[in-house]
DNA sequence: CGGTTCGTTGAGATCGGTCAACTCAAGTGG
DNA sequence: CCACTTGAGTTGACCGATCTCAACGAACCG
C-alpha cells in the first residue's frame, strides 16, 4: 500500500473548493472532524481487495476508482468516487474491491469501529449509514440497467451520469482513461472510442480533446438512456 | 393490484416448512410477529413500480421477482426472492421496481413506518436494516460481475447461485420461466435455451425437464464462474 | 380436439471483440 | 533543440458470439 502522508491532524474545516456541498450529514461531518488527512499520488492503491475494512474514507479532492481483477485478467470497476463521496464502507470485514487514486487524491479517513460505535450511540448516524449504503445500492441497480443495453446506450447513460455528478453543466472533464470507462461499462477500449466518435459525428457530443466532452444534444442522450 | 387476501391476523409463529431458517434476526422476527399475512395467485402484482413504499414484506412461500419495464419494452429483473427473504425495503419512498408473484405466493408484511420506528428505538434492528441493504448491495455487485461475462459464464453463475440459495443440493427446481432468466441475465430467451442445452451436451448439467436442472460437474461450473 | 403458453431449434444478420497499425502529446536525455 | 520513448487514443479489417426472425415441439387446459 504505497501512500504519501501529507499531514495528519485532528480536524480543520474543509475548504469549499475541496469538498462540495454534501447532504448535510452528521456522518460526513463526523468523519471530517475525527479523521486524519492523507494524500495519494496518481495510481496509488488506497486499499487492496481482501484487506480488512478497518477504515472509512471521504474523498476531499481528486477521483477514486474501485476495482477488482478477475481470475482471467479482466478488470471490473466497482465505481468512481468524486470529492465529497464516502467510500470503503462495507458490510464485510474484507474489502470486496480495491481502491485506487486516479490522479492526485486527498482523503480523510477514520476507523470503521469508531463509525460503528458512533452509530450505536446516535440513531441519526445509524440511519445515515443505512442511507449511504442504500444510495450505493440504487447506483448499482442503475448500472445493472446500463449493462443490459447496447454500447451507445451505455455510453449515453455514463455521460449523463458523469455530467450530473460533476455539477450538471454540459461540459465534462473526464478524470479517467478510456480503459477505466471500458471496464466500468463492460466494453472494450476500442468500442468506447468508436462509440464516442460516432456520437460526435452525429453532433450529439463534442470532443475538444480526449478527456473533455461537451454534451450538445441532451435530448438524444436522454432518449438513448431509455 | 390484484391480490387475494387469504387471512389477515396479528401474529402466529411461522411453520418451519414455510420459512426456512433465516439469520436469527430480530428484524425478521418482528415482521413475522407484527405482520399481516396475504396470499397472491400466479403472476399477481404485489406492488407496482412508482407506488409508495408503505410496506416491507417477508416471503413465506413461493417465489417473487422484482422487475422494471423500460420505455422500449425491454424488461429488467431486479432479483428473485425465495422463502425467508425480505423485500420491498427501499430508501426512496417510491418503489423502483414492481414485485410479482411467480406461482402462488404467501407473504407477511408490516408498515414501513413501523419498521423505521422500531429501528429508532432499537439499535440492533437499525443495524440489521443496514445489514439487509448491504447484503442486497453485495448481490447487486455480484450480478454486475456476471453481466460483463459471456452467456455461458452468466448461466453458470446463475445456476450456482440458485443451487446455493435453494439449499446447496445439486438438483434445482427453477420456479421462473426462461424469459425471467433471460431478463435477469440480460440475454434473450433463445440464448438461454441454447446455452443450457449446450451445457447439457457437455455433461456439465442434466435437464430431466425444462424446469428441473441437475448440476453434474460443479468443477466446470465454478471454473466458468471465474 | 383446438388454443395457449412455454421451450427448443435453425438460418441469417449484426454488434461488439480481437488484432494490428497508426497518430498524438508528453516527457526524457543526449 | 531534437531524436527517442512511452502511454493514451483512434481507426480499420476481420471474426465470432449473440440477437433476430421464424418454424416447430411439448405440456396443459378449456
Image (cartoon, coloured by chain):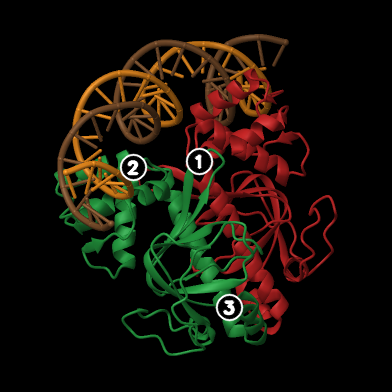
Chain colours: A red, B green, C orange, D brown
Quadrant of res A223: top right
**Residue drawn at (50%, 87%), measured in percent from left and top?**
B9
**Residue drawn at (63%, 60%), measured in percent from left and top?**
A135
Which chain hosts label 2? B
Taking the image as shown, residue A219 lies to the left or right of residue A153, namely right
N-term mark: 3 or 2: 3
* Mark 3 residue element: helix
- Relative height, residue B218 to residue A192 (above, below): below
N-term mark: 3 or 1: 1
Viewer-nearest of discs 3 and 1: 1
Disc 3 packing (10 Å; few <14; some 14–19; many ≥20): many
Task: Name the spot of residue C9 as percent of width and height, x first.
Answer: 19, 35
Quadrant of res C21: top left
Q: Mark 2 points at which residue?
A: B189
Viewer-nearest of discs 3 and 2: 2
Q: Mark 1 points at which residue?
A: B73
**Which mark, by number, is residue B127?**
3
N-term mark: 1 or 2: 1
**Residue drawn at (34%, 57%), measured in percent from left and top?**
B176
Question: Real-space Cα distance between discs 3 and 1?
Answer: 38 Å
Task: Name the spot of residue B141 as percent of width and height, x first.
Answer: 48, 55
Amino acid at each position: 500500500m504505497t501512500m504519501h502522508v501529507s499531514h495528519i491532524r485532528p480536524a480543520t474545516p474543509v475548504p469549499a473548493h475541496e469538498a462540495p456541498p454534501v447532504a448535510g450529514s452528521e456522518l460526513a461531518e463526523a468523519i471530517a472532524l475525527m479523521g486524519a488527512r492523507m494524500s495519494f499520488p496518481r495510481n496509488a492503491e488506497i486499499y487492496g481487495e481482501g484487506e480488512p475494512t478497518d477504515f472509512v474514507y471521504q474523498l476531499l479532492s481528486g477521483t477514486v476508482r474501485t476495482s477488482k481483477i478477475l481470475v482471467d485478467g479482466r478488470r471490473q470497476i466497482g465505481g468512481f468516487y468524486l470529492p465529497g463521496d464516502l467510500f470503503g464502507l462495507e458490510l464485510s470485514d474484507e474489502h470486496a474491491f480495491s481502491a485506487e487514486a486516479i490522479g492526485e487524491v486527498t482523503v480523510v479517513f477514520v476507523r470503521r469501529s469508531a463509525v460503528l460505535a458512533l452509530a450505536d450511540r446516535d440513531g441519526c448516524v445509524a440511519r445515515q449509514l443505512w442511507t449511504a449504503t442504500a444510495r450505493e445500492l440504487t447506483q448499482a441497480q442503475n448500472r445493472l440497467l446500463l449493462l443490459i443495453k447496447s454500447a451507445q446506450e451505455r455510453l449515453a447513460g455514463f455521460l449523463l451520469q458523469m455530467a450530473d455528478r460533476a455539477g450538471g453543466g454540459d461540459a465534462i472533464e473526464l478524470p479517467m482513461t478510456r480503459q477505466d470507462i471500458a471496464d466500468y461499462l463492460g466494453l472494450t477500449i476500442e468500442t468506447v472510442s468508436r462509440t464516442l466518435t460516432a456520437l460526435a459525428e452525429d453532433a450529439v457530443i463534442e470532443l475538444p480533446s480526449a478527456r473533455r466532452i461537451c454534451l450538445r444534444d441532451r435530448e438524444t442522450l436522454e432518449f438513448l438512456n431509455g
